[in-house]
Image (cartoon, coloured by chain):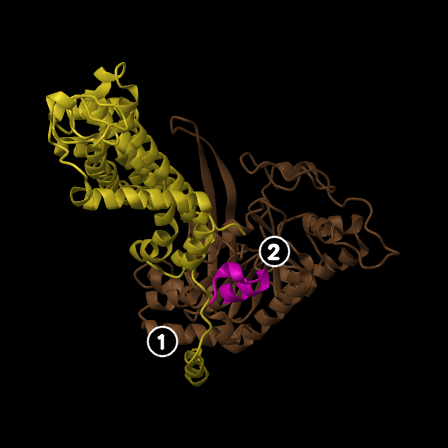
Amino acid sequence: MNTFSIATAEKNVLAVEQSPGYWSGVFRRFSEDRIALFAGFVVLILVVLALFGPWLVPADPYQSSMLKRLKPIGTEGFPLGTDELGRDMLSRLMIGARLSLFMGITPVLFAFAIGATLGIIAGHAGGWINSIIMRTIDVFYAFPSVLLAIALSGALGAGIGNALLSLTLVFVPPICRVAESVTSQIRGRDFVEAARASGANAFAIIRVHVLGNVLGPIFVYSTSLIAVSMILASGLSFLGLGVKPPEPEWGLMLNTLRTAIYTQPWVAALPGLMIFITSMSFNMLSDGLRSAMDVKQ
Amino acid sequence: MNAPILEVKHLTKHFPLKNALGAKTGQVRAVDDVSFALQKGETLGIVGESGCGKSTTARLLMQLIAPTAGDVLFEGKAVGSSELPLKEFHRQVQMVFQDSYSSLNPRLTVETSIAFGPQMHGVSARDAVVRARDLLDRVGLDPKRFAGRYPHELSGGQRQRVNIARALAVQPRIVILDEAVSALDKSVEAQVLNLLLDLKDAFDLTYLFISHDLNVVRYISDRVMVMYLGQVAELGETESIFATPLHPYSQALLASMPSMDPDHRTEAPPIAGDPPNPINPPSGCRFHTRCKFAQAACSVNAQPLLAYKANQHYVACEFFAANAHLSIASTEKAAAELTEVHA
């Protein structure tokens, strides 16, 4: 049998030039992308609002006043006006970041865990396992996502927990689809063949060779769904299927303020503006992440 | 002759063609009843045009796809049987792919890629890394500089050296080189070929060298197998095949080599048309649609491999002796003792 000279190899163990890794390259490219950095900054502010909102608000977001209803933007003491019950809009918008972000991120996280697992298994196994998983997922695809979310929430009943569950189910199919397609692409690459040819089992191949190459793209795709999730959650709240009053949540605020659209259009549009800014920021952030992770040769 | 290290018997791969409903509508006969033996320590070259089944044969041998029929025996033991589990076979036989970039994981450093194989066979992580660095040294890459690098930081030739090291890391006895040098430019190709020859001596290897480049095959191979449309057309010692090709297809293939002599330019194309579709290959001898010596019997009789020159040279054409008179003069002496064999 062949003998490998351990003596020379031991010498080599001493010092090896370590190349800057893949992630440091991603970080460098991302930090050069001004739009993505700006979007990241906005998201950071929103996260801070969500985490520390109760300590930052200028007024009590639940304190209503019949005398101060629907004040315009710029009113003394209410920089962003008041809503239909006279509550401070600025405080409610700040506190609203909490529930809106929660409703945006949590279903996507759950769906990422479920969808990525299913998709990677389907993509790597191929054959009938792939058929069973993907055809089942296709059934969910038959419904438009908004309708599916409304139907599931309606059937399960109103409430945050049920809204989260229905949104999770809505996002599993698209994430699973993406996971399946990137995994089956990787599976066709020669290095996976070579790993199989070296006698490795499927588990080791997925752990060492597949995950590192597919988790990034799946994660980036998932972050782009956070915006969709927020909008769907707002829609559910708007229909009375998600968050219940008097909790401040942007979708719900949009709903209750719609009656004031003719008297105070600017105040009534503010929750929508917040949803827009947040979803745009998440979209641009995931866009920036995607191009930073895209290694072109 | 000693017992062969690897024996291939009637290896067949038909890829089914299915319509939208999954009903079978036909099959691609990628590899059809291929038999040959690989002797310990030799280099067997496989040549043939695109789509003749060279790479499918390699992938079948590597057990990366399941054969439709046929057996692969390693030292007389059937691969995948209880005597020789697949995992043990994969420790003995390794493969180097054509695309040096696609065959390395872009997220792993070079040494991690090389160390992966041995770890799958119970070598500790530390020993595997030691072995990886030693192998990098053996393939001409300074471990200090290259061990921690990523594939995209290397040139094509360096990457293919890493792939060779990766294949050698499990200490195999046979290495299948599937167009392993075809994607490299000529000067690098020569360096890698010489590296392969050095490693063969150093590690006592047996090579199966697949290429479409006749010059390269001639340089590195002890024996050559010519494939046409999923079947073996001719098999023999390299010099015997290059000096006296017996099969009309081999003759055409060799005549297509660019001439190095400006006074003898290759002008007329030695062979016309594209290979027939392997979905419905021609009846009888598969080459008869393009063969300039084709006779009526050729479209009826499938051609078995005939042994010639005391079993050193095989050809799948029963008329090769007669054709020799019509063909180049060097094959005239080929009409010697003929015995039909069942390879």
Instruction: Give the mark nearest the N terminus, 1 or 2.
Output: 1
In this rendering, position of residue B16 left or right of residue B215 = left
**Mark identifier at residue B242:** none
CB under 8 Å between discs 1 and 2 = no
SS at circle 1: helix
Classified by dominant secondary structure, the portion drawn in magenta counts as helix
How far across and down, in percent of the image, does residue A110 sit? 22, 41
Q: Colour of chain A?
A: yellow
SS at circle 2: loop
In this rendering, position of residue B171 left or right of residue A159 = right
Residue at which label 1 appears: B127
Chain drawn in brown: B
Looking at the rendering, the stretch of residues picked out in magenta corresponds to B149-164
How far across and down, in percent of the image, does residue B101 sit? 52, 56
Q: Is residue B307 visible?
A: no
- Chain letter for mark 2, please: B
**Residue B257 to residue B206: above or below:** above
Q: Is residue A260 visible?
A: yes
How far across and down, in percent of the image, does residue B95 sit? 48, 60
Q: Does the magenta segment cover residue B159?
A: yes
Structural distance between the alpha carbons of marks 1 and 2: 32 Å
Q: Nearer the viewer, residue B254 or A184?
A: A184
Residue at the outermost right position: B263
How far across and down, in percent of the image, does residue B15 sit? 46, 40
- Chain letter for mark 1, please: B
Q: Nearer the viewer, residue B166 or B44?
A: B166
Residue at which label 2 appears: B183
Q: Nearer the viewer, residue B310 or A71?
A: A71
What residue type is disc 2 on? Ala
